[in-house]
Image: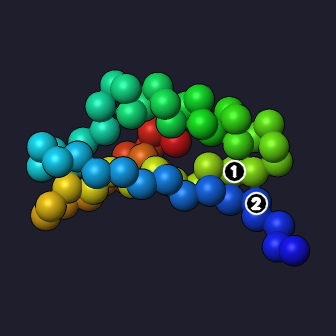
Amino acid sequence: MHASTGILLAHNHPSGDPRPSVSDCLATRRLACAAQGIGCTLLDHFVLSAAHWSSFRRLALL
């Protein structure tokens, strides 16, 4: 059995704009709280587009 203590999230934006939306930010906050509830840490959330990406951690949103 392996115990995980960290979670990475990623999803794509087909529009090509990798900036997190308001909905992305709200969902990420909820997921970070849920992760804490089970003893895990949300390490980062990546938003991907065809040519670019963004990181919640790098943008200081997490």
Given the image, on which type of amino acid does mark 1 rest? Thr
Tell which residue pokes out farthest to the front in this image.
1
Image side of residue 44 versus residue 1, left or right: left
Residue, disc 1 = 41
SS for tag 1? strand
Q: Quadrant of residue 25?
A: top left
Which residue: 28% across, 51% down?
Answer: 12
Residue, disc 2 = 5
Image position, residue 43 (x, y; %): 59, 55
Q: Is residue 58 visible?
A: no
Which residue: 15% across, 61% down?
Answer: 50
Residue placed most toward the observer, 15 or 6: 15
Image position, residue 28 (x, y; %): 50, 36
Given the image, on which type of amino acid does mark 2 rest? Thr
Image side of residue 51 versus residue 42, left or right: left
Number of other residues with Cα within 10 Å of mark 2, as a class: few under 14, some 14 to 19, many 20 or more: few
User: Where 20 sits versus 58, above or below?
Assistant: above
Which residue: 52% across, 42% down?
Answer: 62
